[in-house]
Image (cartoon, rainbow, N blue to C red):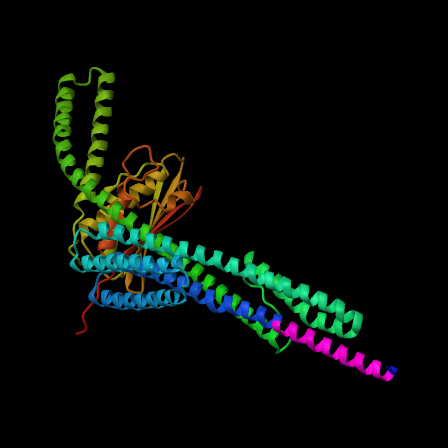
Amino acid sequence: MGISTKLIMAFFEVTLLVLLIGFLGVRNIRQVQSRFDSIVEETAPALEGLNQCKASAMRIHLTTLGLATGSANRSAVREGEEELQELRLNFEKGRAEFSRKAEDSVEKGFADEIGKAALILFGATSRLVEEMKKGGGEIAREREALEGAEKALTTLIDRALVYESAKLKSRDAEAHQAVQRSRQFTFVASVIALLVATVVGYLISRQIARPIGILSTATKQIKEGDLAHRVEVRSKDEIGELSSSFNGMAEAIETKNRELELTNQELRETNRRFREVYDKLVQQEKMAAVGQLASGVGHELRNPLGVIKNAIYYLRSKVGQGDEKVLRHFTIMEREIENSNKIINDLLGFSRTKKPTLVPHPFNDILKEAISTVEVPSHVTVTQELTNGLPNAMMDAGQIRQVFINLVLNGIQAMGGMPKGVLQIRTRQEKDFVVAEVRDTGSGISKENMGKLFDPFFTTKSSGIGLGLAVTRGIIEKHRGRIEVSSEVGKGTLFVVRLPMEVKQAT
């Protein structure tokens, strides 16, 4: 056999070897690609369906609670029911996708259980909406049933997600083994090809092993939670398609994860708003009960206090001016009776605040009457800057007089422990309102107390029960006005009262 024949035979042998290696390599690549495609095709839609179910269930819960805690007008309820119907359809689409991809008995069991739990949730939603329409007293019970159904459904979906994730991990391990086998084959083939033709083996190894290694590393990073990781697509061949499929799967999972996080944030915000509304309702119920109690107790306490006051007057007339110590104690008793009467008046004012009778009245006159009613201590100077020609304000004169008496007394008491103080009162017009400012140079109000200033029974004083400012705000709001306060510790406090002015009809 001549050299040329041997070279030709060697050439054909190398060619056949290269063709065989190429054939086997392509087959392994297609197997790996098929494995990854099956993961994407079989697992990703199931996960997407479950995530869609969970998001829809949470949105159904969120929307129903929003209807239950919002204003129950027909338009809002109708829109809410339409939104709930759409969410139910989305839920059923997700469950149908998951059921369609169910392969084993566990997945089919999950699909059936999710369907049953969904029917319970839909039933609880419908009952709560119907109860809200009727305005019945079972809203709280139906809301608890709704929350229980949503929790049971979400828990079931989470279990299914855990199962699917474990299944994805198992399939990923199988694909990883396929990658490892392909890598081993490539390595062996590269060694053989290296013995025959180093360059051919090197190129084959470079074209196959490196992309598969990148995909293997990317799979591990996705499994460890790095959903933002992507594989660079460097070619349009099978490995490029495999990389594109992998990126698509990662993108779908990341998108669903972001949507779920947004849904969780919305649910937390809705729960926070619901808690605020619930707390306000509880506070209103407490205040109503306190008002009823105050009305009854106030009347009952006034009579014995009047008897005690008359008894003191009688004893003072009998004792005369002979014993100064006894007279001093009589004075103390009378002062404490007056303090008790003031507390009773505050309680009665809190419980009796009625709808005002609004008539036009001079704004400055009411302020002057309030100031003249209050006894101003010698260490306090009252200054008045009342704008002339102010329009009349729409008010109930008696109630507004009580408002300014409360504010003037509050300012004087704030300057009680100071050697000197100034109480400054101003009036002005501001658009459709007449405005009064009551400013004192007292100790001021701390930031932590500003938010509780108008709460009933909140006070920082040693005397009183903290109803003056609560009654004041209630009166102003019933006059369709506004009261604002600003303060700086050590410098004083400013109250600003705005009342609607008289609107004169055009002639």
Residue 111 vs residue 506: left or right?
Answer: right
Identify the image quadrant of residue 108. bottom left
Which one is in front, 335 or 288?
A: 288
Which one is in front, 324 or 502?
A: 502
Q: Residue at x 63, y 74 (%)?
A: 26
Question: Is 302 covered by the magenta stretch?
Answer: no
Q: Residue furthest right?
A: 3
Question: Is 24 covered by the magenta stretch?
Answer: yes
Q: Residue at x 30, y 33 (%)?
A: 463
Estimate the x, y position of residue 81 in percent, counting from the top left: 25, 66
Which range is magenta?
4-27
Which one is in front, 270 or 259?
A: 259
Estimate the x, y position of residue 39 in percent, counting from the top left: 51, 66
Estimate the x, y position of residue 71 in percent, counting from the top left: 24, 60
Residue 66 in view = no
Identify the image quadrant of residue 361. bottom left
Q: Residue at x 36, y 64 (%)?
A: 95
Estimate the x, y position of residue 188 in percent, counting from the top left: 72, 65
Which one is in front, 136 or 89?
A: 89
Residue 310 vs residue 421: left or right?
Answer: left
Residue 346 in view = yes
375 vs 131: above or below: above
